[in-house]
Image (spheres, rainbow, N blue to C red):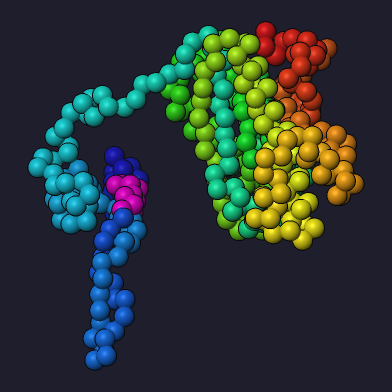
Amino acid sequence: MLHQQFNINYNNLPKIFRWGSCVLLMEVEAIVKYDKDGCPITRLKKQISTVHSQDIARRTFWNQKPSLVKELGSFVEDIKRIDKDYVKYFQSKNKLMPYTWGVIRIDGSHFHKFADVHNFEKPNDEQALKLMNECAVGVLDAFREFIFSYGVSDEYSFILKRSSHLQRTHASDIVSSVVSFFTSMYVMKWKAFFPLTDLVCQPSFDGRVVCYPSTDILRDYLSWRQVDCHINNQYNTCFWMLVKSGKSRSEAQQILKGTQSQEKMELLANNFGIDYNAIGEKLRLGSSAFWEEETGCSKIVVQHCNIIDGGFWEAHPYILA
């Protein structure tokens, strides 16, 4: 049909269209130096190679690549002769527990390095926190099954409705969708928050999902994350104020070792004139992004409020209804 109606020879189409791509980590001989006589000295080195081959279903493709045989073992049967249902049998079928609160939590991966490369302000970068909140709002808008989210620093937790149809989806599919969407939002929105800073390396996030069987346990989880926000922020504020005052990082760690919350507050007040309780709520309490119901419509809002006490939930009873 392609040839008769469109004068297209399918075999002339690029291999990448017809066969797809294989990215392989191969061992190849590479010249590492030369001896005194000028003769090259070679060593086996790992090298990434991209190939487009129609033969990956054949045992010859694999067995002719010694480094792959070493890792995978030799193939004695052409893969195309194996029943595809047999292969699918090994795919995990883990789904979320029905009628529970599914929590997808994402965390920055190697984010300390990312923050250093992009010169984030210490202990907290206002623009970086705003960017995280913007990404969370994007997730809530794109995935309407999420009703609430809480974030601090480089992490965010998204709460799935108990009656969500996504509970019938593979857990790995939900997590990968949220993580990839959040990451792409972070890249797309970067210049809106850092107009003078180029994105010189890619941000990376990992994710997991946990199902909590009751509303009380879900609130305990959220309370734990907010307590952790306070503990980390108070420590980091003290640590970086000490470093900025001339202490080395190891000296600052030693000074803070074993100190309690009240001692850290006194250190900030006495040494730097900082009232910790006057620090912005975004830094002490984290950010809550959720759908707020108003007369006739709903909208996504970002607030910095105490979600440990019952007052917030009493004021927004529809969130965990």
Label total for image: 0
Residue stretch rendered in magenta on the structure: 14-24
Q: Is residue 44 left or right of residue 175?
A: left
Residue at image location 80% in from the left, 58% down from the top: 245
Determine whether 128 is above or below 318 in the image: below
Determine whether 310 is above or below 197 in the image: above
The residue closer to the viewer here, 195 or 272, is 272
The residue closer to the viewer here, 293 or 116, is 116
Give the residue furthest to the left.
76
The question of residue 18 being in magenta is answered with: yes
- Residue 215, image quadrant: top right
Q: Is residue 16 left or right of residue 164?
A: left
- Residue 268, image quadrant: top right
Q: Position of residue 252 (x, y in %)?
A: 70, 52
The residue closer to the viewer here, 211 or 30, is 211
Q: Which quadrant, please, contains the C terminus? A: top right
Q: Which quadrant, please, contains the N terminus? A: top left
The residue closer to the viewer here, 208 or 169, is 208
Q: Position of residue 310 (x, y in %)?
A: 76, 13
Residue at image location 31% in from the left, 27% down from the top: 91
Q: Position of residue 96 (x, y in %)?
A: 47, 17
For residue 138, say whether it is visible.
no
Residue at image location 70% in from the left, 28% down from the top: 226
Give the residue furthest to the bottom.
37
Residue at image location 52% in from the left, 14% down from the top: 165
Q: Is residue 121 left or right of residue 41?
A: right
For residue 30, say whether it is visible.
yes
